[in-house]
Amino acid sequence: MSSATSVIEPIVFRWHQAEITAIAPVTPHVKSVRLRCALAQTYRAGQHVDVRLTAEDGYQAQRSYSIASAQDGSGTFELMIEALPDGEVSGWFSQCADVGDRVEMRGPIGGSFSWDGPDGGPLLLGGGGSGVVPLLAMLRRRAQHWRAIPAALIYSARTHAEMIALAELEQLAATDPQVSLHLAATREPGGKRIDAALVAGALTRIGAPGKVFLCGSNRFVAAASDLIMAAGVAPGLIRTERFGA
């Protein structure tokens, strides 16, 4: 046990310097932040990192963010950071961060909630709000090398304008016959929440899933899990990540 810990600890638990190389708006409340960091060579799609900020007086704040990109050999990776009310870390990224700024990171974290082509499929993915980010990384990884694996994404957000990378997801679904996109805008006129019909539509496109990944609020993940199991998917296939109280 001690020897295994000595191997893992320097990789996962050591803080690394990361430099911001690009910042761009994604939605009214979410920014894409690309960073150059040694961790860009070690992660799998679906995993996340801890980000730590240190003020001049020594005060520190940290938060976890899922990685949105798939490994591409550039030495960088992308985070999608949503500005939260009173969020110390997200507030800094939203209002103060600039290209060239440095932060600290550690990870990658989340071995069970990760995917690569040899893990198989078909893939059934479900994201609520910013919970789509690690699923976006999986779809991007699939697009790099594993296009023969069918994938369906169920994505729920308050409005279409708040859906992260919606144009990219729509383009992927329009050009790749093995990918389907199933949207639920909960706060638009005529909108609805994820329901049995949405799940059935996704399953019809991919058949029996080999892997299921769900990420979002407790409420979203619980509802999606219940609906997917009610549709006959074995509970043991489902992997979840939750955020919020």
Image (cartoon, helix red, strand yellow):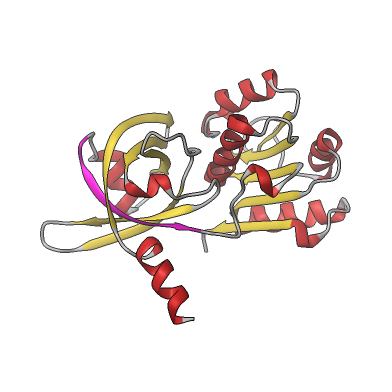
Identify which residue is drawn at 43% across, 67% down.
Answer: 8
Can you say whether 97 is above or below 105 in the image? above
Instruction: Residue 17: give x, y in percent of width and height.
Output: 25, 51
The magenta stretch is 100-109
Asked if residue 163 is among those painted magenta in the image, a careful observer would answer: no
Residue at the extreme front of the image, as rendered: 3
Q: Is residue 101 magenta?
A: yes
Q: Main secondary structure of the magenta part?
A: strand
* Viewer-closest of 140 and 28: 140
Residue in the image at 84% along x and 53% along y: 233
Closest to the observer, 194 or 60: 60
Examine the image and state in which quarter residue 24 appears.
Answer: top left
Q: Residue at x 60, y 28 (%)?
A: 169
* Image coordinates for residue 220, horizontal then vertical, percent: 65, 52
Q: Position of residue 62 (x, y in %)?
A: 32, 59
- Residue extending furthest toward the top: 175
